[in-house]
Amino acid sequence: MRPREAGAAIVHPRLISRTEDGRRSFFTEAVADPPGAPGETLVYRGGRAFRRWEPTRSKLAAAIVKGFADPLPQPGDRWLYLGAAAGTTAGHVADLVGPTGAVFAVEKSVRSFARLLATADRFPNLVPLLADASAPRTYGGFVPPVQGLYADLSQPDQVAIAIENGRAYLRTSGSALLALKTASMGRDRTARGHLTVAEAALGEVGEVEPPVGLEPFHRGHYLLGVRATRRWFVEPRASGRPPDGPPAGRGP
């Protein structure tokens, strides 16, 4: 696996970068109408509007600033977003997948969901869902098979929740991104210890990319990229029962 290098080249048709005050800044091509929210910086290139992606407000942006390049949402993809909050990063993921893609954004807090609705009003490809990510089957009627899963959950079992959602919705050729919040995972281990446990759990179901620490933008956070293997789609073994195979219709 390749090492992470800040400033490494990132190739994405809907993502650009430029140097501002000696710092590399990233912008996603806007899908929203109007393209920018109040206070948001826009730049225009070739008649296309791009929104600045702030690393202090988005863990995925912080990871990209620090050299994360792959896997990223691609044009035309469908992504399931867990823990969307007000939709800041979910909106940028919607930019990355573009008008032919879709983002299904799950948020369980009613207060945050009200802000998510306001964000989604501007995005034709952002679908807000008031639901609990720890019960993924409850929104099965609204989410089709997806190419990607993004999880940003402040819960002790955030890794297990992501894995279960992937088992329910992720295609067998899909990828996942986890914004790991170690402070929510208990005090029995250090941040590095929680990261090690998370990597081991994810390694049981996929190929894990090298983690990216998100300091100084987000304390105690890491971004983990995972490429799904068929092991992800095997249900946990119940006592006396063999594991089930991949879910029906979960083709590449």
Image (cartoon, rainbow, N blue to C red):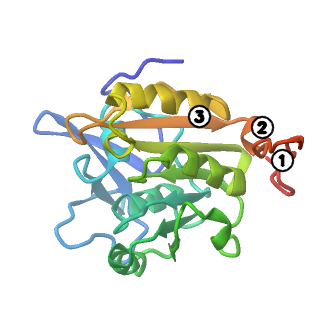
Q: Residue at x 44, y 47 (%)?
A: 156
Please name whichever residue, 238 or 183, is drawn nearer the observer in this view of the structure. 238
Is tag 2's residue or tag 1's residue first in the polypeptide sequence? Answer: 2
Check whether the beta carbons of the residues at disc 2 and disc 3 lie within 8 A of each other. no
SS category of the residue bearing label 1: loop
Look at mark 1 in the image and give the residue it sits on: 246
Kind of residue at badge 2 = Arg
Asked if the residue under mark 3 is in contact with the one under mark 1, i.e. CB atoms within 8 Å, the reply is no
* Structural crowding at the residue carrying mark 1, measured as other residues with C-alpha within 10 Å and reported as few (<14), some (14–19) or many (≥20): some
Label 3 crowd bin: few (<14), some (14–19), many (20+), radius 10 Å: many
User: Answer yes or no: do the residues labelled 2 and 1 have beta carbons within 8 Å?
Assistant: yes
Dot 2, crowdedness within 10 Å: few (<14), some or many (≥20)? some
Q: CA distance from mark 2 to mark 3?
A: 13 Å
Q: Which residue is mark 2?
A: 230
Indicate whether 54 appears above or below 195. Answer: below
**Which numbered mark, 2 or 3, is in the foreground of this view?**
3
Q: Quadrant of the N terminus?
A: top right
What is the secondary structure assignment of the residue under circle 3?
A: helix
Q: Residue at x 47, y 55 (%)?
A: 96
**What's the amino acid at mark 1?**
Pro
Horizontally, residue 209 falls left or right of residue 169, namely left
Up-down: is 246 above or below 50?
above
Q: Where residue 92 appears, x then y in whole percent?
A: 40, 58
Q: Position of residue 17 (x, y in %)?
A: 31, 42
Q: Which mark is residue 15?
A: none
Label 2 secondary element: helix
Mark 3 — residue? 202
Q: Using the image, determine if residue 144 lies above or below residue 220.
A: below
Q: Position of residue 128 (x, y in %)?
A: 49, 74
